[in-house]
Amino acid sequence: MKRLLLGSSLVMIAGFIAVFAAILYKINSNKSDLSDAPFAATIAVGADADILQVSTGEGMLLVLVREGSKTALLRLDPVTGKELGRTDFVAR
């Protein structure tokens, strides 16, 4: 009985080690290097626009801008700089 308990405990510990190793591998291998990715040299925004935040995601460049008293989210093609979509935030 003691050997059976020891054997099953060792199998369970090995399983936990394998699961944690897989999790750590996925976390560390999912880093994408954007330094070689092509980005547009210039992107046109409004003359009075203030850039609040920029991020990349799903092949798009997301730019949060404030134009006067309005705030908008611009979805841009990172290679060409062309505007793919715009979401204006309005108060209700």
Image (cartoon, helix red, strand yellow):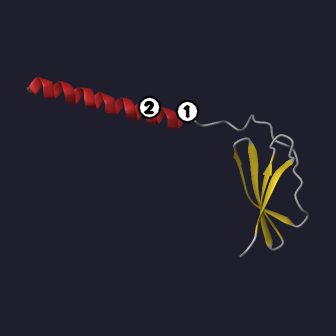
Considering every residue shown, the one lying at the far left of the view is 1
- Location of residue 53 with respect to 36 vertically, above or below: below
Residue toward you, 77 or 34: 77
How many numbered dots are placed on residues in this image?
A: 2
In the image, taking residue 8 as reference, residue 67 lies left or right, namely right
Residue 68 percent location from the top left of the image: 84, 72
Q: Spatial distance from mark 2 to mark 1, Cα to Cα?
A: 10 Å
Residue 65 percent location from the top left of the image: 79, 62
Q: Secondary structure at mark 1?
A: helix
Q: Residue at x 41, y 31 (%)?
A: 21
Mark 1 — residue?
Answer: 29
Say which quadrant the C terminus sits in.
bottom right
Residue type, mark 2 in image: Ala
Residue 29 percent location from the top left of the image: 55, 32
Front of the two marks 2 and 1: 2
Mark 2 — residue?
Answer: 22
Q: Residue at x 44, y 31 (%)?
A: 22
Residue type, mark 1 in image: Ser
Considering every residue shown, the one lying at the far front of the view is 92
- For disc 1, the neighbor class at 10 Å (few under 14, some 14 to 19, many from 20) is few
Asked whether the residues under the numbered discs 2 and 1 touch, taking CB atoms below 8 Å apart as contact, a structural biologist would say no
- Location of residue 25 with respect to 46 vertically, above or below: above
Residue toward you, 75 or 6: 75
Residue 13 percent location from the top left of the image: 27, 31
Say which quadrant the N terminus sits in.
top left
Q: In which quarter of the view is residue 17 placed?
A: top left
- For disc 2, the neighbor class at 10 Å (few under 14, some 14 to 19, many from 20) is few
Q: Which is more N-terminal, label 1 or label 2?
A: 2
Q: Which mark is residue 90?
A: none
